[in-house]
Amino acid sequence: MSETIRVGIADMNICQSPNKITTIGLGSCIGAVLYDSKTKTAGLVHIMLPDSTKIKQNQNKMKFADSGIVLLIEELEKRGIPKSSLKAKIAGGAKMFNFSSSTDIGSIGDKNIAAVKSKLKEMGIKIVSEDVGLSYGRTIVFDPDTEELTVIKAGKQKNII
Amino acid sequence: MNRQETLSENVSNALGELGNIGAGNAATSLSVILKSSLTMSPPQVAIHDFNSLENVLGGPDVTVVGVLSTIDGDMQAMILFVVGVEDAKNMIKALLDYEIDWQSEMGMSAVKEIGNIIIGSYVASLETLSGMKIRCSQPESCIDMAGAILSVPCIEFGKISDKALLINSHFKAGDQEINGYIMMVSEIHSFNLLLNKLGIGGIDE
């Protein structure tokens, strides 16, 4: 029996095939999936903010792009998966509501996307596919067996990346 | 991760009453626009972490229509007016007296205007009660998953804290079958400023 592991906001988890991993209702947040083809293992972190060094209240490492991605890599390494074998798929970073991009609320999605991409690049992890930006929320499900990331929009339209 | 801290009875009552008066005024405005009587349940006041906050609208993947204003000045908060998709359709019909494509520019503009009036009356009563100076932004609307909509206040207040305080009022408009929520979300520090103005002890930050 396979199950789907749910990851909350500013939270992360790891799953192995035949299980799947999901996070629901990503707005400006980003869901970053790091996976390994050989062991069919995938980790998902639900990131809210770009930079932990700019925020005083930064104990929850999973909340931020910089510290969240590092933490997920460490957890995967603990399971014997080397960083060099990891690949990434990312989704989210939308601009919710139509607040002008000059405001913090309007630009947070773009900042999150940029921060996630730059951290993954720094870590040497390739982004295989992405569904980011624009102005709609996303629910994502990753299947480590097929390596497909299913992105579901409100109204249930699906996009597999 | 569904930790939900409790508030002292005093604080909870004071914020509940604030929500009651704010939402009460907002509901009166709404009943005038919709030409219908309105019932309201007592507001729920609670401290939420991000993961329990996303469940307050019936689950993170439910599609809802949200109108959001940010308030700043003496305190920072977000006011959200949220209705379901069917409720939004009924609301537009009641407002315009004829049916239009609710997702059209005209439809969404109607929703935004209703939101504007509701949020405006909520904030006005907050200002009168507390004597605080509060500015309210132009509202913006959005149709999306509840989780995605609520991630906006989560992110904004996530910069300061892992918890948010929510005053949530639920209303129902007579025969129109319009269910909706008016909620004020902020971090605890802003609510403490508000409680101090009301002469009531604060919440541990």
Image (spheres, helix red, strand yellow):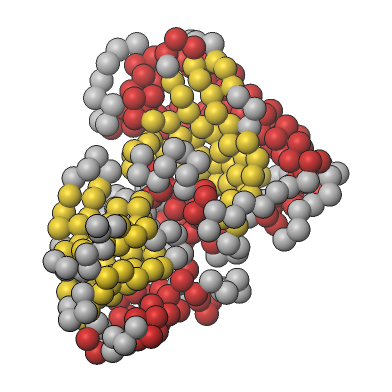
Which residue is nearer to you in this view: B98 or B152? B152
> Percent from the top left, x then y, of residue A97?
38, 47
Q: What is the number of callouts on the image?
A: 0
Nearest the viewer among A130 and B3 is B3
Query: Residue at the spot x=46%, y=64% of the render?
Result: A10
Q: Is residue A108 visible?
A: no
Kindly indicate the quadrant of the structure image that contains residue B24: top right
In the rendered structure, the answer to whether residue B117 lies left or right of residue A142 reads right
| Quadrant in which the C terminus of chain B appears | bottom right
Q: Is A149 or B81 nearer to us in this picture?
A: A149
| Residue B122 falls left or right of residue A53 | right
Q: Residue at x 69, y 28 (%)?
A: B21
Q: Position of residue B57 (x, y in %)?
A: 46, 38
Camera sees residue A115: yes
A107 lies above or below B192: below
Q: Is residue B20 left or right of residue A129?
A: right
Position of A146 relative to B24 (above/below): below
Image position of A110 with respect to B2: above or below: below
Residue A101 appears left or right of B194:
left
**Image coordinates for residue B203, horizontal then vertical, percent:** 76, 53
Q: Nearer the viewer, residue B4 or B113?
A: B4
Identify the residue shown where x is 48% and y is 28%: B180
Q: Quadrant of residue B11?
A: top right
Query: Quadrant of residue B44 in the image?
Result: top right
Q: Position of residue B183 (x, y in %)?
A: 56, 38
B162, above or below A40, in the image? above
Query: Measuring 59% from the left and 22% from the top, which residue is drawn there?
Result: B40
